[in-house]
Image (cartoon, helix red, strand yellow):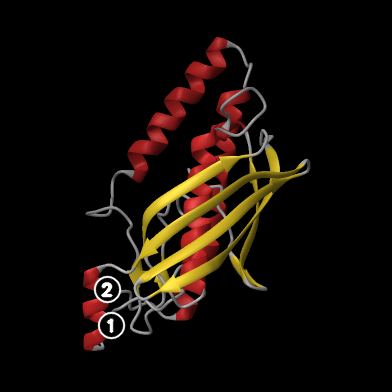
Amino acid sequence: MDELSREEVEAERELYGPFTQSLRELVDAAIRTTVPADEVRSAHAEIRAITERLRSAPMRTTYGVDLRTDGRGRAWGNAVVGLRNAIAPPLTVVQEGRGVRAAFTLGAAYEGPPGSVHGGVLALVLDQMLGEAAGAGGKPGMTATLTLSYKQRTGLGDLTSEAWIERVDGIKTWARGEIHSVDGLTVEAEGLFILPKWAREAMASGDPGTPSPRFFE
């Protein structure tokens, strides 16, 4: 359970947000660099030294999701929306209209075919978006199935994604979503999300640590 105050959470956000963004920029620079070999060796040594400094006080586990007593929490280690995960673009998902929406940028670190986003990365993004839509609609769940239809290549750069609930049947929620680039619709997805047994039992017992329908920050 996360017992930090809102002020303490915001202080951590201000500290780690820019720090993690600098790591994303480092990855992009490392992919694109053409500096001389001696510069690469020097940078390598500096990065190794910084890595050892950061490893001097690690968490005992992965970041997971820190939950507060109000049911909300932080998924800052998440591979898509994680504030502290340099692998994450990250997406900032907002509730809009009938579902959720996110605008984001995918650069060199997400390339598959030349100049295009890797198809698996697009699946990763849409899995998250559909799950967020289910949660935002009050019907959270874990991914049971995910089906994608690639309409055209998705170029690297600025993208948007939308997702919404299609229908609900008890603990099952079907959601749909899309990704758009400057060239229009590039990917469609549909998925089935099921509220797991442990969550159903916790909600039935009134456990204050149970995530609310929309709990990622």
* Up-down relation of residue 102 to residue 46 (above or below): below
**Contact check, label 1 and label 2, Cβ < 8 Å:** yes
Residue at horizontal 60 percent and vertical 24 percent from the top: 113
Residue 203's disc number: 1
Q: Quadrant of the N terminus?
A: bottom left
Compute the Cα span from label 1 to label 2: 6 Å
The image position of residue 42, as x and y in percent, is: 49, 20
Q: How many marks?
A: 2
Q: Residue furthest top?
A: 37
Pointer 1 local density, CA inside 10 Å: few below 14, some 14–19, many at least 20: some
* Residue 173 image point, x, y percent: 43, 68
Image-based side of 106 in relation to 169, left or right: right
Which of 16/72 is in front? 72
Q: Which mark is residue 82?
A: none
To which residue does mark 2 refer?
199
Q: Is residue 128 above or below residue 154?
A: below
- Residue 63, how many percent across, how many down? 33, 57
- Residue type, numbered disc 2: Ala
Residue plotted at (60% across, 12% down) = 36
Q: Nearer the viewer, residue 168 or 196?
A: 168
The residue tagged with tag 2: helix, strand or loop? helix
Label 1, secondary structure: give it.
helix
Asked if residue 6 can be seen in this view, the reply is: yes
Q: Residue at x 36, y 76 (%)?
A: 170
Amino acid under disc 1: Met
Q: Residue 60 lies in what quarter of the image?
A: bottom left
Percent of width and height locating residue 132: 49, 64
Of all residues, the one furthest to the bottom in this rendering is 206
Q: Nearer the viewer, residue 186 or 169?
A: 169
Residue 83 visible in the shown view: no
**In this view, 146 is above or below 216:** above
Sort mark 2 into few (<14), some (14-19) or many (20+) by Cα contacts within 10 Å.
Answer: some
